[in-house]
Amino acid sequence: MDKKRQIAIFTTASLPWMTGTAVNPLFRAAYLAKDGERIVTLVIPWLSLEDQKLVYPNNITFSSPAEQETYVHHWVDERTGFKSDFSVLFYPGKFSLDKRSILAVGDISERIPDEKADIAILEEPEHLTWYHHGKRWKIKFQLVVGIVHTNYLEYVRREKNGRMKAFLLKYINNWVVSIYCHKVIRLSAATQEYPKSIICNVHGVNPKFLEIGKKKLEQQQNGIQAFTKGAYYIGKMVWSKGYKELLDLLRDHQKELTGLEVDLYGTGEDSDQVQETAKRLELAVRVHPGRDHADLLFHDYKVFLNPSTTDVVCTTTAEALAMGKIVVCANHPSNEFFKQFPNCRTYDNGDGFVKLTRHALAEEPAQLTDAQRHELSWEAATERFLRVTELDQEFTRKLSKSPTKNFMSASLGLSSSMEGASAYVHHVASGFEATRRIFGAIPKSLQPDEEQCKELGLPMPAGHAYLAIEESKSSGVKG
């Protein structure tokens, strides 16, 4: 029997934070492990209680990694309908308020022992390696695959001095991704371009949306009106997530869209402003708090309006299509994958938006075929992933697979190559607190603190261990 490949999936977020980089890598782990041909480990961030309160919804917190691991497995098993067979490891993380993101603390590649370091999948490779200081991923692992989830440049361009920030970020991203990844998958052409990258949507939809779609199909086939509500949009309520574009379109075309009613569902920093803007329109635009897209409330809507252009591949668009709805969205690279489905309608301008929206509300959605439903599934996404990464084929490694004690032992062997020199520069720069701070790292994130080490059962960093011994001595003297 051939030796099983060992796959470690590193990502930048975890449930119960319902963000794409928490949900999609979780499904990837479950489906890669499903057939039992691979040993899969999902490596996710562990947050202190204070950070959990900032990040996780509905006051959900965990007192131990084991408790959160149970939550994660239960969530995915409930949605896939099978018992998942992957393990979970945690790395120390901290929440960055200004970036609204979790950043890794210390060398997270160490969570996988050298003898088990075979394949690493880096979900958001730029995010995971901006401040990486430790073993070089390409040396430790036989194959490193980066999956680019986020259009960071588009978000940064919307900030103050956005063009300059985007220019710098583009080169930093290219730098770290080329240093640390053998292969790069871009979910769509809406992401930053990377040398030798592959464009392929390797994400699927939560199976429960396909189940909803099957029920709607049965209603259609039995002559029952499957969709009794009109148009809606759901997404995190921040302007950059499509709300500005949608409300601008509705404002500019109120006369042509007379009688249109739209429901917006979301929660976020810009909720109050979105509500105020909606009230100023002559159209009936109702704003509601965020809900789970699979909620019964959404089943009967017929048209999903999504003008967002900041997404890479919009999860809610895929979910709406899986439920059998018509989707009206922008003609944009992020929507290229969805154009193969008859219920996806793309527009180029405001007039096109009006025309498609009116037609969508006046007609019934096309009935999805079995092949079309499969294409939206995680089974198909996993097939695409295995095809483009060639994971199931023998990977010939150019470098020797010896245990890496530290960065220097690996980098010395690469000193003649430009890439090795570039990697060494990044390693040195990321080792200084001042340099890290300049580029936006969280203060004192070079090594995990004492609390994180205790919670995760990690060895205490040398400096912390010395301080702990001194404190112990001091308390002993006082006693």
Image (spheres, helix red, strand yellow):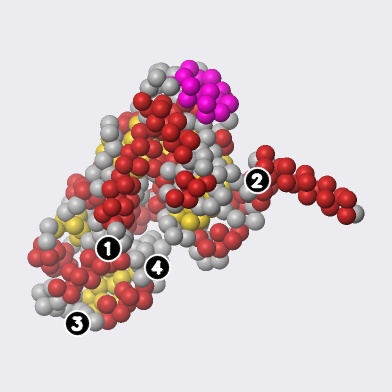
Q: Which residue is mark 2?
A: 453
Point 37% across, 27% down: residue: 419
Disc 2 versus disc 1: distance between alpha carbons?
40 Å
Residue 234 in percent (x, y) is at 32, 65
User: Residue 408 colored magenta?
Assistant: yes
Q: CA distance from mark 3 to mark 1?
A: 20 Å
Magenta region includes residue 329: no
Where residue 268 is drawn, which disc sits there? 4
Circles 2 and 4, Cβ within 8 Å, touching? The answer is no
Q: Is residue 380 above or below residue 271?
A: above
Residue 436 horizontal side relative to residue 251, left or right: right
Residue drawn where x is 31% and y is 56% of the image: 155
The residue that disc 1 covers is: 242
Query: Disc 3 marks which residue?
Result: 282
Query: Between tags 2 and 4, which lies in front?
Result: 2
- Disc 2 vs disc 3: Cβ atoms closer than 8 Å? no
Q: Earlier in the sequence, mark 2 or mark 3?
A: 3
Residue 227 seen by the camera: no
Q: Looking at the image, which residue is at 56% across and 35% down?
A: 110
Residue lying at the far right in this picture: please name it. Answer: 479
